[in-house]
Amino acid sequence: MREGPLAGLTVYDALHDPRAAQLLLERLRHPGSAGPLRFECDPLRPVPAGLVPRLLDAEQSNSSLVYGDEFILKLFRRIQPGVNPDLEVTGALARQGCGRVPAPVAWFRTTHPYGATLGVLQPFLHGASDGWTLALDALAAGDDFTAQAHELGRATADVHVALASAFPAGAAGENGRTAAAMTERLTSAAHAVPALRPFVPGLRSAFAALATCDAGPAAQRIHGDLHLGQVLRAGRDWFVIDFEGEPSRPLAERRSAHSPCGTSRACCAPSTTPPGSAARGGPSGRAAAARPTARAMPPGPAGTRARSTACSAPTRRTGPCTRCCTRPGTAPTGFPYPWRRSNDSP
């Protein structure tokens, strides 16, 4: 910095510092507290020490660190009071025995100035591709995507059946709210993609009909931001990831029950911000969408898996969640709070 209270200091994202990243992993390996920070883990899923960290550069709304190609730590940039759905939902689905999602291995949160989730550690495994890349590849090659789409629908159903069991049902009358939300998104999509405008009248009629339907399926917890960039295929199996919901929406809304029809709409509708899209089909957009970006995947019968995708919401970037300010040529070496294990007295 050249001026202001930080003049003479080098300011950079602390996650770029391997020592800070390794310290984070050590804290996650051993449950405990550091000032307002609370570190917790699944005791049945041990994390080895000494894993080399690597910061991914394709994230938009969050930051992700890969540790030794074994685990991935997702750090949330937009912090809101309460439990982040990416921890709440994945943990609940793991307890339900749903093998379509990565189970949280460790996580950390803060208690000040309010309680909030800061990050989640999950398995990082190789071998999977995201649905957006697969769909683009099939389109470019002139291949039929029908069979893959059918299996994707089965995976989506598996996850939402498990969600219906894991969380209480919502209130009646959700169809009207879902129809209104679908209409709002249709308007935005048609504004962004003029080629969709001929389909708008028919879709509006269909959404209006939904609002007048009988109660339909009960409102329940849903994915919240499902699109082809949020699903992975490994071998013949599809998996669903990223349950954070739309970061721009209030946390209470993302954690509430919604009509499962909204999930079908979100997965089938064209996205106005497809993963990595910079040129809407041009070379740079396609290259960004297909750029390998490691993500978390649960272990399963198909062997090791990973995901490759870019964030679907470049406009949601709000800056890094962790920064450090040090003299030029130096870097942070620890937290500013004394470390205390969870079983120590406060």
Image (cartoon, rainbow, N blue to C red):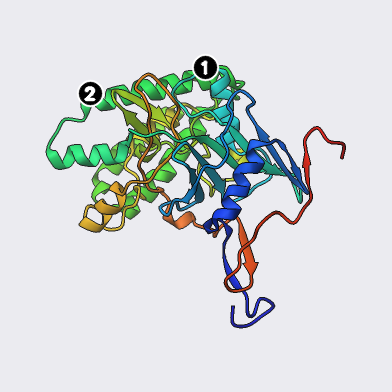
Q: Position of residue 32 (x, y in %)?
A: 74, 38
Taking 136 as reference, is 82 left or right? right
Residue at label 2? 147
The type of residue carrying mark 1 is Gly
Residue at label 1? 97
Taking 85 as reference, is 52 left or right? left
Q: Position of residue 254 (x, y in %)?
A: 57, 38
Closest to the observer, 255 or 59: 59
Please tell me how crowded label 1 is: few (under 14), some (14-19), or many (20+) other residues with Cα within 10 Å: few
Q: Position of residue 278 (x, y in %)?
A: 30, 57
Residue 256 higher or lower than 292, as above or below: above
Q: Residue at x 83, y 36 (%)?
A: 344
Closest to the observer, 77 or 270: 77
Q: Is residue 216 visible?
A: no
Foreground mark, 1 or 2, reads 1
- Which corner quadrant holds the N terminus? bottom right
Q: Position of residue 88 (x, y in %)?
A: 60, 31
Q: Disc 2 on helix, strand or loop?
A: helix
> Which of the two labelled residues, at mark 1 and mark 2, occupies the earlier sequence position?
1
Taking 84 as reference, is 298 left or right? left
Residue 254 higher or lower than 330, as above or below: above
Please tell me how crowded label 2 is: few (under 14), some (14-19), or many (20+) other residues with Cα within 10 Å: few
